Amino acid sequence: MEISKIIALLGGAGIGAILSAILVFLNNSKKNKLDFITKERSEWRKEIKSIIVDLLCGNNRYSAVSRLETELNPYGRYKLKTDETDETDETDEYEFYMNDGHIWQLIDNFDYSNKNIKILSKYLEILLKYDWERSKREIKFDAINNLIYFVLVVGSFSNFLFLLNVKEILDTVLLTLSSLFMILGIFFFSDVSRKINEETIAKRLFLAFLFGSISYSIYRMLYWMISSEITVSITIIFSLLTIVIVISVEYTYFNKVNKEEKRYIDFLKENINTED
């Protein structure tokens, strides 16, 4: 084995301990955050169910509506005031429904009639169903995100080790840029992946550079480990296939979320029109 590889392995042993500590910390932080959010959502669903019961039973209806106002997204009420005349803007429409604007619209003109009670109860039942499906989907997707975070952390450290041994300017530049985007990905990937409806150029460029950096990092690791046994072209192809699989999974998830949100909004619009 070459001396450079031995030095890299020895250096990797020490960095490996640091890496393990970082991964444990990140995993525990994400788990605690997920547990907290899951618990809060569970309590929120219980409260919404209690409000529905009070509305339908006729007991404490005034109190139920007052409690409901504290459980809804306040942005929905303000989106209604600023955007209710603009029905052609899909982004405004998305923000209106996903921030409970349709419920605020009903509450702001609520007369406690049986008709409005039924409409409000229906909206809350639909909201509960959507939130439950969203919670299940996010828990499943969390495993994929954990894998991506693992690759980002490991790739960043491996790129650092490679930087200690490369001499070519091009490799140095590529490794530096790859490390930079992967480190940014550790901190910002979660925020970017949550804003699924925002198909902006900046978001697309960020994801393109991020997954390109991951692909290059995988290529460097594979080439370093098995370059003597497998050709460079095979290594590149394997790296690209790996990143294509990851991107495909991410895209499938994003596409599914978009469809579910659109189905939720379309269902609400149909019910609003029929109730009117």
Image (cartoon, rainbow, N blue to C red):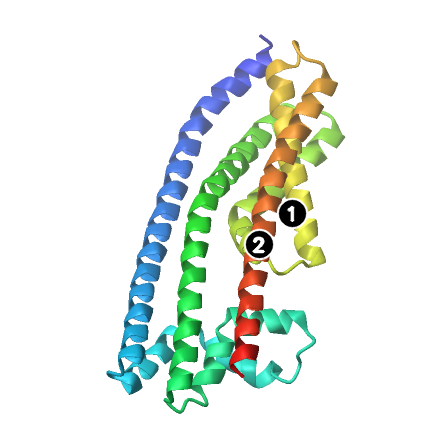
Give above or below for 262 relative to 2: below
Marks 1,2: beta carbons within 8 A: yes
Q: Is residue 17 left or right of residue 232?
A: left
Numbered badge on residue 207: 1
> Of the residues shown, which amino acid type is indicated by label 2?
Val
The C terminus: image quadrant: bottom right
Residue 168 point in image, percent of width and height? 74, 26
Which circle's residue, 1 or 2, is located before the other in the chain?
2
Closer to us: 79 or 115: 115
Q: Residue at x 63, y 23 (%)?
A: 165
Residue 17 in the figure: left or right of residue 255: left
Q: Position of residue 105 (x, y in %)?
A: 49, 83
Q: Is residue 58 left or right of residue 13?
A: left
Residue 193 visible in the current orientation: yes
Residue 163's x, y, as percent? 62, 29
- Residue 258 as seen in the image, left or right of residue 111: right
Q: Quadrant of the N terminus?
A: top right
Task: Say above or below: 252 vs 218.
Answer: below
10 Å crowding of disc 1: few (<14), some (14-19), many (20+): some
Residue at 35% across, 77% down: 68
Q: Secondary structure at mark 2?
A: helix
Q: Nearer the viewer, residue 81 or 15?
A: 81
What is the C-alpha distance between the residues marked 1 and 2? Answer: 8 Å
- Of residues 31 and 13, the one nearer the viewer is 31
Looking at the image, residue 263 lies above or below residue 65: above
Q: Quadrant of residue 64?
A: bottom left
> Residue 224: x percent and y percent?
62, 19
Residue corresponding to mark 2: 192
The quarter of the picture where residue 269 lies is bottom right
Q: Which residue: 59% across, 62% down? A: 262
The secondary structure type at the circle numbered 1 is: helix
Q: Amino acid at mark 1?
A: Leu
